């Protein structure tokens, strides 16, 4: 028995020895996917990163921005309802995590396109524009964030410092200035890699400079940078527009045209179709503020296919115009009934309008650029007249959703619309007035800008925080002192994995609360 035991031991040692030798021999070859690639080209990272970021924006636009900004209102008395300014801490994680993951690929695009053997100025410029877009979303949502040390885990930076928002903004503007220069040459890119402009580099340059205007306007109220910012806005619009082309029409609007379904893999499928259930759309009603104005204007963007509230299948009494929304901020226990919602015809087995609409993937549109110019002109920073930009913004906004309805602000159908809706520009109004039920030039501009930015990530919320417009009604059920949240909490995972820099950030910026103002909001 002992002899057999020794023999078995020798055999075991021999097997282990051979196994160890085999593991060392050709280890890399055996463990390398013969069909995969160990390196990646810049164009291979572009589509997935942009689609994933836009998906994040659309999902949270629906559940967060729209509830805060009275586009929709949840019918529920439960806690944690955003429309009551009751924001749970866990809500912050989704955007933070997904935006930083997306930035990893966007940074890699720039790195790859900067190497001598793969040098491409267009991919460099597009990367800088996309980085500026995503970082601006991050800092406008949270305030001070990791920036200069962000996405450097491969370099051993696991606990990045938080940069101040002012410094971040100044660097983002520098990125966009660089991008404008890089894209001048129009170096070709792979068209199929570009879900936004199908390889049209000139349109990417327009997007970069339009984003430039957005960010300049956002910080224009800060005295320490105002003079430089205002001068740059004038340079882009008035002094040297040829060097800073911007988005001028909806053919240049930055969007991903969703052209697929949940079952197709060779096209881009809307996140509303993949990530959001039909019941999620039916859970939120269209808000009174959003819907009743459109109804009062007899706005063509209210689609007849939605049906009016008095049709039998909805079982709701008819409002003055046939459409009526739910007031936001209602107190728990009020028993507010659901009325209108973003649904095609009330049939539970039919598709939701927004789930199937291919035009919902907006990054930045022509109408927003026009309204940026309208505000700048109203403040006297650029040449006017203001009404030219105001009317163009309105026409662009309608034209995006209804391209055959009007062609321009001089179209008779548009003139009839603004006249009958009592939306004609009024130069006699004061520049600004935030008194409820009052009017002003900024209120006229921002009411229309609010509708133009429908479905555009958090831009309605950002602009409201910057300007106080449009003036939203305050329901009795609002929390947070009935004050619009100024930011989101820092994610819980950041508090636990980066505790020192998290503490430094709140010591500098203020408490990690939704009431703490970010830099560009402070007086």
Image (spheres, rainbow, N blue to C red):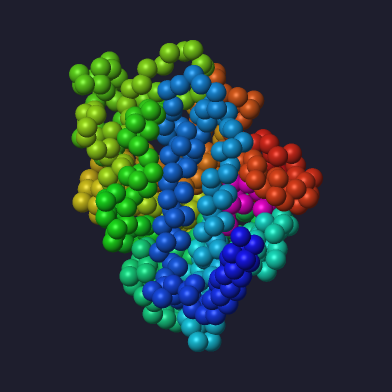
Give x and y (percent) for residue 370.
42, 54
Depth check: 397 or 142 in front? 142
Give x and y (percent) for residue 333.
49, 12
Depth check: 34 or 54 in front? 34
* Residue 212 within the magenta-colored segment of the rendering: no
Q: Classify residue 164 as left or right of residue 220.
A: right
Give x and y (percent) for residue 384.
46, 56
Q: Visible in this render: residue 443?
A: no
Instruction: Name the quadrant containing residue 205.
Output: bottom left
Instruction: Name the quadrant containing residue 493.
Output: top right
- Image position of 333 with respect to 401: above or below: above
Q: Quarter of the image containing the N terminus?
A: bottom right
Q: Classify residue 38 as left or right of residue 480.
A: left
Q: At 45% across and 21% down in the image, what residue appears?
A: 76
Q: Quarter of the image containing the C terminus?
A: top right
Name the main secondary structure of what is drawn in magenta.
helix
Q: At 52% across and 52% down in the image, what residue appears?
A: 98
- Image position of 38 with respect to 445: above or below: below
Give x and y (percent) for residue 216.
58, 58
* Residue 142 within the magenta-colored segment of the rendering: yes
Q: Visible in this render: residue 79?
A: yes
- Image position of 465 with respect to 387: above or below: above
What's drawn in magenta, residue-wise? 135-145
Depth check: 37 or 55 in front? 37
């Amino acid at each position: 028995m002992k002899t057999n035991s020794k023999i078995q031991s020798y055999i075991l040692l021999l097997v282990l020895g051979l196994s160890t030798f085999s593991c060392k021999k050709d280890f890399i070859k055996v463990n390398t996917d013969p069909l995969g690639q160990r390196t990646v080209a810049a164009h291979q990272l572009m589509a997935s990163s942009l689609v994933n970021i836009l998906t994040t924006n659309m999902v949270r636009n629906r559940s967060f921005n729209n509830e805060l900004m009275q586009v929709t209102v949840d019918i529920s008395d439960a806690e944690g309802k955003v429309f009551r300014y009751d924001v749970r801490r866990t809500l912050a994680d989704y955007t933070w995590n997904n935006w930083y993951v997306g930035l990893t690929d966007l940074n890699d695009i720039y790195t790859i396109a900067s190497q001598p053997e793969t040098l491409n100025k267009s991919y460099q410029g597009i990367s800088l524009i996309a980085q500026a877009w995503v970082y601006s979303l991050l800092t406008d949502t949270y305030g001070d964030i990791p920036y200069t040390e962000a996405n450097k885990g491969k370099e051993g930076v696991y606990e990045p410092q938080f940069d101040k928002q002012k410094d971040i903004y100044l660097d983002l503007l520098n990125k966009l200035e660089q991008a404008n220069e890089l894209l001048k040459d129009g170096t070709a890119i792979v068209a199929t890699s570009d879900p936004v402009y199908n390889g049209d580099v000139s349109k990417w340059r327009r997007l970069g400079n339009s984003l430039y205007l957005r960010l300049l306007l956002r910080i224009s109220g800060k005295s320490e940078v105002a003079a430089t910012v205002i001068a740059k806005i004038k340079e882009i619009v008035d002094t040297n527009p040829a060097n800073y082309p911007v988005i001028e029409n909806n053919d240049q609007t930055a969007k991903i045209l969703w052209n697929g379904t949940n079952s197709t893999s060779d096209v881009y499928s809307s996140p509303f179709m993949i990530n959001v259930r039909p019941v999620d759309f039916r859970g939120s009603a269209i808000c009174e503020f959003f819907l009743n104005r459109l109804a009062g204007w007899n706005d063509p963007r209210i689609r007849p296919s939605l049906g009016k509230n008095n049709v039998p299948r909805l079982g709701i009494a008819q409002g003055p115009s046939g459409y009526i929304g739910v007031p936001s901020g209602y107190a728990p226990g009020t028993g507010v009934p659901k009325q209108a919602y973003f649904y095609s015809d009330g049939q539970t087995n039919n598709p939701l309008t927004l789930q199937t609409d291919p035009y919902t993937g907006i990054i930045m549109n022509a109408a927003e650029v026009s309204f940026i110019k309208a505000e700048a002109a109203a403040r006297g920073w650029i040449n006017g007249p203001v009404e030219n930009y105001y009317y163009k913004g309105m026409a662009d906004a309608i034209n995006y959703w209804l391209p055959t309805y009007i062609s321009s602000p001089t179209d008779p159908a548009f003139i009839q619309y603004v006249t009958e809706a009592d939306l004609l520009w009024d130069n006699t109004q004061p520049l600004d007035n935030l008194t409820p039920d009052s009017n002003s030039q900024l209120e006229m501009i921002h009411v229309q800008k609010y509708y133009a930015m429908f479905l555009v990530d958090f831009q309605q919320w950002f602009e409201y925080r910057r300007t106080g417009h449009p003036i939203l009604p305050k329901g009795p059920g609002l929390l947070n002192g009935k004050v619009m949240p100024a930011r989101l909490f820092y994610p819980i995972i950041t508090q636990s994995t980066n505790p020192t820099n998290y503490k430094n950030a709140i010591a500098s910026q203020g408490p990690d609360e939704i009431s703490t103002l970010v830099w560009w909001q402070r007086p």
